[in-house]
Image (cartoon, helix red, strand yellow):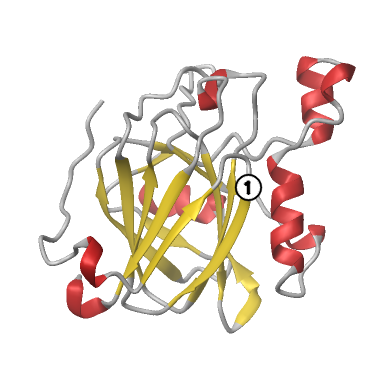
Amino acid sequence: MTGFIQTSPARTLSNTAQDHYIAAEAPFSTFIKKGQVVRIEDTYGQQAVDTLFYNAHDFSERYSSQDTMREQGAAYISTGTKVISNEGRVMLTVTADSCGRHDTSAGACSCESNTVRFGHYTKYLHACRDNFVIEVSKHGMSKRDVVPNINFFMNVPIEPSGEMTIVDGISAPGDYVELKAEMDVLLVISNCPQINNPCNGFDPTPIRVLVWDDEAA
């Protein structure tokens, strides 16, 4: 599936404000200023990128999957989606998407959910929730501040019955999603380490995060 791409030719690698390489299975965070555009790139394809957003000046305001889905009247995130906070405010807008759709219902993997889904031998494998807790702690938050997240590039078909299944990803190497910040935000990522279901093609890989100032947007 191909998304609707509406990127700007003014954004190049030579005029980035930030350029980050995130290793396979690793956590990451950075601040994005209002008006800046952030691109999350699935460098090798079929790599789920678990993502959270917080108001940079008040971490109690953070991404709300329920409000985001209700606002747009759709289960998936793609071009035109307004990322909504738990205060009902627009945090970011998706301005370009070469993949087509992104999940915000299946949540993040955890040691507990891995054990239930895949067996006790998986209990000690690294998980996205661990990554989130590690990363938000750098900003004075705790596991209580980790909320339901966006799973960029993760393919989760929803059946008419409401049943969800994580299946092979549809993202190709180099696919990306771009979001324009409508407020100053803290971006927190877990580059998903899951190896027990096909969300990462059973082979977690690195990703890239780039940020441009508004004059290049």
Residue 193 in percent (x, y) is at 64, 35
Q: Nearer the viewer, residue 58 or 124?
A: 124
Quarter of the image containing the C terminus?
bottom left
Check disc 1 and report the residue beneath it. Answer: 26
Q: Is residue 196 above or below residue 55?
A: above
Residue 86 in percent (x, y) is at 58, 65
The residue drawn where x is 17% and y is 55% is 7
Q: Residue furthest bottom?
A: 57
| Mark 1: secondary structure | loop
Left or right? Give the position of 127 relative to 213: right
Quarter of the image containing the N terminus?
top left
Left or right? Give the position of 24 relative to 89: right
Amino acid beneath label 1: Ala
Which image quadrant for residue 143?
bottom right
Residue 82 in percent (x, y) is at 37, 59
The residue drawn where x is 31% and y is 77% is 35
Q: Nearer the viewer, residue 184 or 75?
A: 184
Q: Is residue 30 above or below residue 154?
A: below
Q: Residue furthest left?
A: 9
Which image quadrant for residue 211?
bottom left
Left or right? Give the position of 108 relative to 144: left
Which image quadrant for residue 78?
top left
The residue drawn where x is 53% and y is 69% is 30
Residue 132 in percent (x, y) is at 69, 53
- Label 1: how many residues lie within 10 Å, few (<14), some (14-19) or many (20+)? many
Q: Nearer the viewer, residue 158 or 21?
A: 21
Q: Is residue 54 above or below residue 166?
A: below
